[in-house]
Image (tube, rainbow, N blue to C red):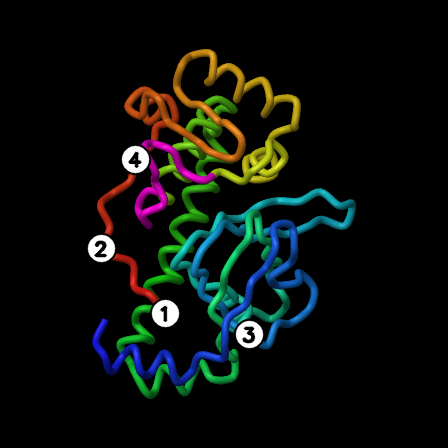
Amino acid sequence: MTAQQRDVIQSFRRGSRIIEAGQTIIQEHRPSPHLFTVYSGWAFRFKTLSDGRRQILSFLVAGDFLGLQDEFADGHTHGVEAASEVSLCVFDRDDLWEMFQAQPRLGYDITWLAAREEKLVDDNLVTAGRRTATERVAMLLMHLYRRASRVGLEHEGWVEFPFQQQHIADALGLSLVHTNKTLRRLHDMGLHRIDRGWLRILDPQALETLGDYFERPMRPTPLI
């Protein structure tokens, strides 16, 4: 990022915000006047059915850009909740077009981030539609571990993992009982360990093979 790009982003920045774990960043049925970049922490996008059942659409980590979907939707598409303490950079939604005009390269970067988010949702659809329960959980553990590692959150083989079994069930379309049994089976196979909010992959090759996990190398993620 050039000094000029940093100055442009800084000129549109409207401050920062700290959100505690379990609190809402974007409400599901209310328009948000802001867009956000995640500085640190974990969050997730979700939709809730009328009977209270929740589907987690994607997980969010440092560098992810939030709220763009509502800019192009007829209604409010999703909510966003913090899974751990989350630090955010805040932008006014009304400034988005002016930002594109002032710095077209940033416009391209935002488009790239949106396309990557669409790819992640595509991968989740394949997981929910075609993978078995064991494959789903294996895929998700590898996916979250790789995403955390990619942004420098790995520490001596461990990454922060603030998710409960209910989060995993809501992301994969499984019952809580089935999720518990599957996680225990993978643990007993010696593939992973979850300990007090941290995740370690003990046999990444075996877990990748089991989950049919494949991720192409990606260029460095643009930061907004």
Under circle 1, the secondary element is loop
Lower sequence index among marks 3 and 1: 3
Magenta range = 149-160
Q: CA distance from mark 2 to mark 4?
A: 16 Å
Residue under numbered circle 3: 34
Identify which residue is drawn at 48% across, 42% down: 125
Q: CA distance from mark 3 to mark 1?
A: 14 Å
Under circle 3, the secondary element is strand
| Viewer-nearest residue: 220 or 115 | 220
**Dot 2 amino acid type:** Arg
Under circle 2, the secondary element is loop
Lower sequence index among marks 1 and 4: 4
Q: CA distance from mark 1 to mark 4?
A: 27 Å
Q: Are marks 3 and 1 in contact (CB under 8 Å)?
A: no
- Label 3: few (<14), some (14–19) or many (≥20) C-alpha neighbours in 10 Å: some
Identify which residue is drawn at 33% across, 50% down: 151
The spot of residue 76 in percent (x, y) is 63, 66
The spot of residue 126 in percent (x, y) is 44, 38
| Camera-nearest label, 2 or 4 | 2
Lower sequence index among marks 2 and 4: 4
Lower sequence index among marks 3 and 4: 3
Q: In which quadrant is the N terminus drawn? A: bottom left
| Camera-nearest label, 1 or 4 | 1
- As drawn, which residue projects farthest toward the top? 188
**Dot 3 amino acid type:** His
Identify which residue is drawn at 31% across, 69% down: 109
**Tag shown at residue 214:** 4
Under circle 4, the secondary element is loop
Residue under numbered circle 2: 219
